[in-house]
């Protein structure tokens, strides 16, 4: 008899209708979680685009973009993982968001060194926004 209840709770938790503790989450937490997922997704796309931009700059002889190519590429991976795990309210969402915020700090700082480059400035802003949303989500989910 307990199996249907456990299965139902798992399905609801996966859909984000229940928190990982089995109780319904308030709209306040859901708002921060949804904003975090959105910011991570946006940052992932900006970082992937910026990595491509850096590769083109390197190909044109601007070797100073080797570091940002790597930071953007890695940051995009952190953001993608965070977006996926937070979207389904996985039990490791706080861990991945903490790591994502730190990766965004590193990437954003590296891209800010090229503030006159519009593409890199957009990436830096997306990184700052993502780090902020990850940290706000962590505050509201108890980390």
Image: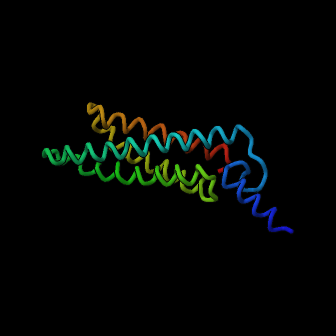
Q: Which residue is at the front of the view, 64 or 10?
A: 10
| Left-right relation of 137 to 57 | right
Residue plotted at (56% across, 42% down): 36
Residue plotted at (40% across, 50% down): 76
Furthest residue to the left? Answer: 61
Figure disc tally? 0
Residue plotted at (64% across, 51% down): 143
Q: Quick check: 58 above or below 7? A: above
- Position of the N terminus, as image quadrant, is bottom right
Residue 119 in the image, given as x and y percentages of width and height:
30, 35
Residue plotted at (48% across, 37% down): 129
The image's colour scheme reads rainbow
Q: Quick check: 31 above or below 2? A: above
Residue 8 in the image, given as x and y percentages of width and height:
76, 58
Residue 69 in the image, given as x and y percentages of width and height:
28, 50
Furthest residue to the right? Answer: 1
| Left-right relation of 134 to 71 | right
Residue 27 in the image, given as x and y percentages of width and height:
71, 38
């Amino acid at each position: 008899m307990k199996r249907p209840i456990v299965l139902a709770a798992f399905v609801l938790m996966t859909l984000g209708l229940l928190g990982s503790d089995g109780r319904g989450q308030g709209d306040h937490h859901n708002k921060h979680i949804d904003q975090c997922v959105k910011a991570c997704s946006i940052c992932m796309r900006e970082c992937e685009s910026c990595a491509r931009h850096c590769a083109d700059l390197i190909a044109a002889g601007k070797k100073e973009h080797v570091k940002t190519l790597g930071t953007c590429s890695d940051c995009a991976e952190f953001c993608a993982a965070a977006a996926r795990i937070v979207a389904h309210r996985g039990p490791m969402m706080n861990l991945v968001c903490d790591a994502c915020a730190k990766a965004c700090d590193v990437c954003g700082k590296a891209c800010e060194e090229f503030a006159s480059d519009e593409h890199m400035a957009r990436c830096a802003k997306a990184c700052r926004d993502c780090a902020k949303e990850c940290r706000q989500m962590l505050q509201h989910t108890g980390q």
